[in-house]
Image (cartoon, helix red, strand yellow):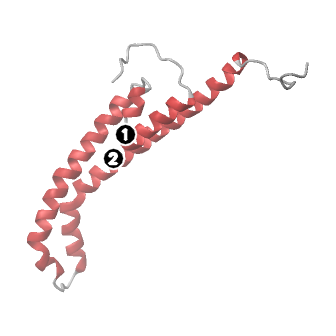
Amino acid sequence: MSDPSAPRKPLDRQQAWGCLTANMAVPGTGSIMARRTAGYFQVVICVTAMLLTLAYGTRFIAWYFANRARLNEMQDDPLTVLDELWIHMRWVVAGMALFALSWLWSLATSLSLLRQAKANERANRTNVPPRITKPPGKM
């Protein structure tokens, strides 16, 4: 990855789009590439969310298949089934919500990088060579 203590260089649009793409694949990686400290927090939240979802999701699936027949029976109060499902599924939902949080945060960081790159591009337009107004050979 990149050294966070190194000074930030202004990004051009191509680099900013690369950071956005990386952030959409794995939240935080593009932010780290752009030398943003927030990227490390985004990656930690993302990995924590994936581990929560994987661990508790696997546990929920095993529990559901063990109790499938009982849950699908007609019952007097269907809310008891929903309550029981929620009790076993809440950590899976928490993991998904955490992942969505890290993804949205990295999207916001990426959009900020794109805005910065556009502003840098406008500021550097003075370095553009002059336009050719006369076609070659007609002087």
The C terminus - image quarter: top right
Can you give x and y, in whole percent of width and height, for residue 30 in the image?
Answer: 41, 33
Local SS, label 2: helix
The residue under label 1 is: 27
Q: In this view, does 67 lie to the left or right of 18?
A: left
Nearer to us in this view, 50 or 88: 50
Q: In this view, does 17 lie above or below 138?
A: below
- Mark 2 touches mark 1? (CB < 8 Å): yes
The residue under label 2 is: 99
Residue at image position (67%, 21%) is: 123
Q: Which is more foreground, mark 2 or mark 1?
A: 1
Q: Quadrant of residue 43?
A: top left
Nearer to us in this view, 130 or 83: 130
Amino acid type, callout 1: Pro
Residue at image position (18%, 61%) is: 88
Q: In this view, does 56 lie to the left or right of 136?
A: left
User: Callout 2: few (<14), some (14-19), or many (20+) C-alpha neighbours within 10 Å?
Assistant: many
Mark carried by residue 72? none
The N terminus - image quarter: top left
Can you give x and y, in whole percent of width and height, for residue 75 in the image?
Answer: 18, 84
